[in-house]
Amino acid sequence: MAFYGCMYYAMMRPSEVAALTRDGCYLPDNGWGYLTFADASPAAGRAFTDDSKVHEHRGLKGRTKGRPNIDPRARRPTRKVPIPPELVALLREHIARFGPGPGGRLFRSENGNPIQPSTYWRVWQKARAMALTPAQLATPLLRRPYDLRHSGVTWRLNSSVPATEVAAWAGHSVEVLMRVYARCVVGLEDVWIARMDAALRPGGDPPQGQPPPGQAAGDPGQPPERCEEDGNEKGEGRK
């Protein structure tokens, strides 16, 4: 549960979850916590790693600074992602039950090795079959574990978190975020209209055509202190 929770609530890639350590977790008793991570453990295969191991230890995707064989003196890039109490509880329960493994890793196999992609894929297919209806199973709905990460990004965008923050937490550029998720924020037209309406009428001003309280119809009222069109404040330029 906690493995998949990291993908959804923290928008982590599977390889990043596989490399998550106890030292990178701030898990308070109440409220939101944080995950800080700098490494990933993708399963490249024994034929494609220098040490003939299935997993390759590397830095975060798209960030070469601080990776092995690049410049050992460079500071390792990290991501710090806020996580809700739901994920905090999942991780605390996971740590209490299994404890950290070699190197402080939270997730590993029975032999202490990083989780294989085939393992979390197999478990995901069983969980999906138990949670969805037959009609839903026939659709692409959450077909891949990676879809949890996409859903997590969509959740934050739909919560009106600025795209720059979401991109930084998810570990890619704003350009990629907007290209991939440009149409994910749907069904919220009434919310946007209400916010635009509130911005046009700060302080509860009435809609256009209705005078504010205490002002008679046809009374133009007082001129504004600042003209937004030309940017000149009242009295500017006068001696």
Image (spheres, helix red, strand yellow):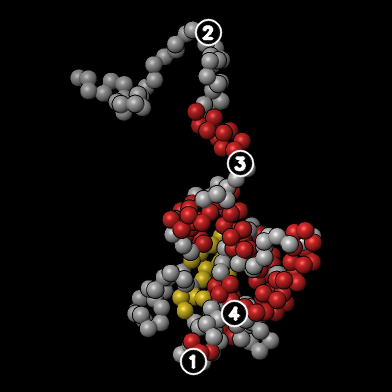
Image location (x, y in percent) of residue 147: 62, 63
Camera-near label (3 vs 4) is 3
Mark seen at residue 127: none
- The mark that comes first in sequence, 1 or 4, is 1
Tag 2 residue? 216
Q: Closer to the N terminus: mark 3 or mark 4?
A: 4
- Callout 2 amino acid: Ala
Structural crowding at the residue carrying mark 2, measured as other residues with C-alpha within 10 Å and reported as few (<14), some (14–19) or many (≥20): few
Mark 3 lies on residue: 188
Q: Nearer the viewer, mark 1 or mark 2?
A: 1
Of the residues shown, which amino acid type is indicated by label 3? Leu
Numbered label attached to residue 105: 4
Which amino acid lies under the numbered mark 4 shown in the image of this protein? Arg
Q: CA distance from mark 3 to mark 4?
A: 40 Å
Q: Nearer the viewer, residue 78 or 125?
A: 125
Secondary structure under badge 1? loop
